Amino acid sequence: MLTLAIDMDEVLADAAKKLKAWYYRDYGKTFEDEEVKGKDLKEAVIPEHFSLFRKYCNTPGFFRDLEVMPDAQEVLKELNKQYEVYIVSAAVEFPNSLKDKYDWIMENLSFITWRQICFCGSKSIVQTDIMIDDRVRNFKDFKGRKLLYSAHHNIFETNYERVNNWKEIRQLLL
Amino acid sequence: MLTLAIDMDEVLADAAKKLKAWYYRDYGKTFEDEEVKGKDLKEAVIPEHFSLFRKYCNTPGFFRDLEVMPDAQEVLKELNKQYEVYIVSAAVEFPNSLKDKYDWIMENLSFITWRQICFCGSKSIVQTDIMIDDRVRNFKDFKGRKLLYSAHHNIFETNYERVNNWKEIRQLLL
């Protein structure tokens, strides 16, 4: 069985949506698609607010109730029968997110067991046959097949095989 | 720089000591060296208490104040200059341990950064050049050099290069 590493934020869980909502709550600003093309959210706000998104991410509860990305549950459940699936999240950067992310997986992806979860700092020591991720930095030391999950910040990356949504993952891998 | 994965419980942190202490507190029983040779602690208690050690491990706070293994801080600090060190713990089995283990590392191994921490379920997707671990099951899919850290439960394993303490790790790797 092939091993398959799947990222959480922006792939399984819509963290960007909540970051935008919290920033709107605190500063009344919305983000146009155009201004975050090829950028992180923090690059679209004033420099004084750079660190704010990190603060949001380390707030207990932030990751607990994120929306699941469309079709992710259904497709992942099928993948889980044909692949050795691992949820791999660089969550250790935000230690207060660890339990929230675990609980989120248990609630939203109940077919996944604790054995299939990996919370790391750097993903450089994780090796599987396939990795689906929205951050090209996570592909740096990765030796398997890389599938870049489209997100506003990676829209100009041209060096990777790309998936735009979970329906495309189904077509490609099932 | 070679990559080096190091386990936490029974290698960096003395979890067994606290498990024994809690069991003594609850049931007044001590463990003789002889009765845990080649065995887990749970195999030395009555079957009705099998699951108790798992319960202890998932109690918030259990892993927060474990004793550091002798010489571990000093030797690891040196290793951290010559190797790309990662602390790799199968902590996801006990979700309430995640934050405690993170805080324990920050307090006791302050030269380690969040990038160097990996909390997984199975260690099968972790690949580094060297792994130090007390559980042979973690070596199953591991392709690098395996160093078995001696513990009561692995005393009869003969298939692995063995280290008995951190002084020996220093001699071998520094």
Image (spheres, coloured by chain):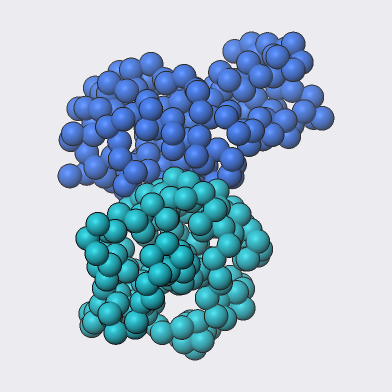
Chain colours: A blue, B cyan
Say which of A95 and B33 sits in front: B33
* Residue at (46% x, 83% y) in the render: B165
Q: Nearer the viewer, residue B148 or B65?
A: B65
Q: Position of residue B35 (x, y in %)?
A: 27, 80
> Residue drawn 50% across and 82% down?
B166
Q: Is residue A2 left or right of residue B123?
A: left
Q: Quadrant of residue B160?
A: bottom left
In this picture, residue A11 sits left or right of residue A98: left
In-front residue for pair B79/B66:
B66
**In the image, is residue A24 above or below residue A145?**
above
Q: Residue at x 18, y 35 (%)?
A: A82
Most distant residue in the front direction: B28
| Residue pictured at 22% horizontal, 38% vertical | A83
Q: Is residue A80 left or right of residue A40?
A: left
Where does the image place residue A68, in percent across and percent down from the top left?
A: 42, 21
Q: Is residue A144 above or below residue A166?
A: below
Q: Tell me if residue A133 can be seen.
A: no
- Residue B44 visible from this viewpoint: yes
Q: Is residue A123 left or right of residue B123?
A: right
Q: Position of residue A87 (x, y in %)?
A: 37, 39
User: In terms of depth relative to the viewer, which is nearer, A159 or A153?
Assistant: A153
